[in-house]
């Protein structure tokens, strides 16, 4: 009788041990840790664009603007006192500030020779006119009817207002900045103030152009 009780106890203990082992194994398979964050891909774009070195800048229409051999477009603004006419400019390759000034010159017939390349940076852009420019030599003869000016003052203001407006709008992507926040400086041939003696006007080279001053 004692042997039968001992055998029954042993069998009960064995069955209990087996049941406990199976439960532990089942729980272990159901509670595996989640994957680490490094193995989970994120769909958030890189704000600096450093994640894709092959990406190219896009123009206002979302197309690439830096592929060699492709025609690039810009807008030339001709006018004064906040009233401008727009003219499209299309060139092969990247358009530079110098191209814009040359485009205005070719369109209007005004000599816009520069004494040096247009410099640009965080402080804005600086345009240095040569002595041969129309600011000092006057309009061409004959003038183009569409861009006819009546005196040296109107010519000078139209040149400066047009270049400023064109450069400002070219420098800012539409909808992503204020063109008026781009400072444009005008200088004479020596890099100093732009002195227009024939009309008694001086444009300080150390201050952003803020409109044509009154003539004396």
Image: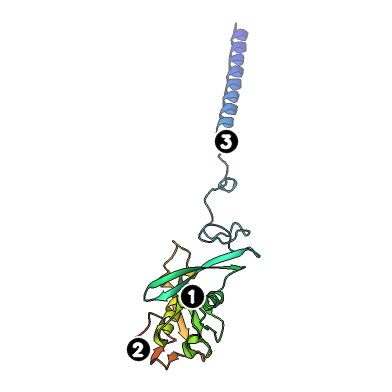
In space, the residues marked 3 and 1 are separated at their CA atoms by 54 Å
- Looking at the rendered image, the disc whose residue lies closer to the viewer, 3 or 2, is 2
Instruction: Specify the farthest residue to the right.
Output: 69
Q: Are marks 3 and 1 in contact (CB under 8 Å)?
A: no
Quadrant in the picture for the C terminus: bottom left
In this view of the protein, which residue sits in the foreground, 53 or 106? 106
- The image quarter containing residue 212 is bottom left
Q: Above or below — where is 117 with respect to 35?
A: below
Residue at the image position 35 percent from the left and 85 percent from the top: 213
Q: Name the residue that disc number 2 marks.
A: 215
- Looking at the rendered image, the disc whose residue lies closer to the viewer, 1 or 2, is 2
For label 2, the SS is: loop
Total labels: the figure holds 3
Residue at the image position 46 percent from the left and 72 percent from the top: 77
Q: Are marks 3 and 2 in contact (CB under 8 Å)?
A: no
Q: Name the residue that disc number 3 marks.
A: 32
In this view of the protein, which residue sits in the foreground, 80 or 12? 80
Q: Above or below — where is 176 with respect to 155?
A: above
In this view of the protein, which residue sits in the foreground, 46 or 118? 118
Q: Name the residue that disc number 1 marks.
A: 122
- The image quarter containing residue 96 is bottom right
Q: Residues within 10 Å of mark 2 (few under 14, many from 20)?
A: few
In space, the residues marked 3 and 2 are separated at their CA atoms by 83 Å
């Amino acid at each position: 009788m004692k042997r039968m009780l001992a055998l029954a106890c042993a069998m009960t203990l064995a069955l209990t041990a087996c049941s406990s082992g199976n439960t532990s194994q089942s729980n272990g398979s159901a509670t595996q840790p989640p994957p680490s964050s490094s193995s989970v891909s994120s769909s958030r774009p890189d704000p600096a664009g450093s994640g894709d070195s092959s990406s190219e800048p896009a123009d206002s229409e979302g197309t690439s603007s830096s592929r060699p051999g492709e025609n690039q477009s810009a807008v030339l603004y001709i006018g004064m006192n906040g009233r401008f006419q727009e003219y499209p400019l299309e060139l092969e390759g990247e358009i530079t500030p110098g191209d814009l000034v040359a485009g205005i010159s070719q369109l209007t017939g005004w000599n816009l020779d520069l004494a040096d390349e247009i410099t640009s940076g965080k402080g804005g852009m600086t345009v240095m006119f040569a002595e041969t420019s129309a600011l000092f030599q006057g309009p061409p003869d004959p003038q183009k009817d569409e861009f006819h000016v009546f005196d040296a003052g109107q010519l000078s203001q139209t040149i400066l207002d047009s270049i400023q407006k064109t450069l400002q709008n070219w420098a800012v992507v539409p909808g992503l900045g204020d063109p008026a926040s781009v400072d444009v400086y005008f200088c004479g041939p020596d890099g100093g103030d732009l002195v227009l003696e024939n009309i008694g006007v001086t444009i300080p080279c150390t201050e952003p152009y803020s409109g044509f001053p009154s003539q004396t």
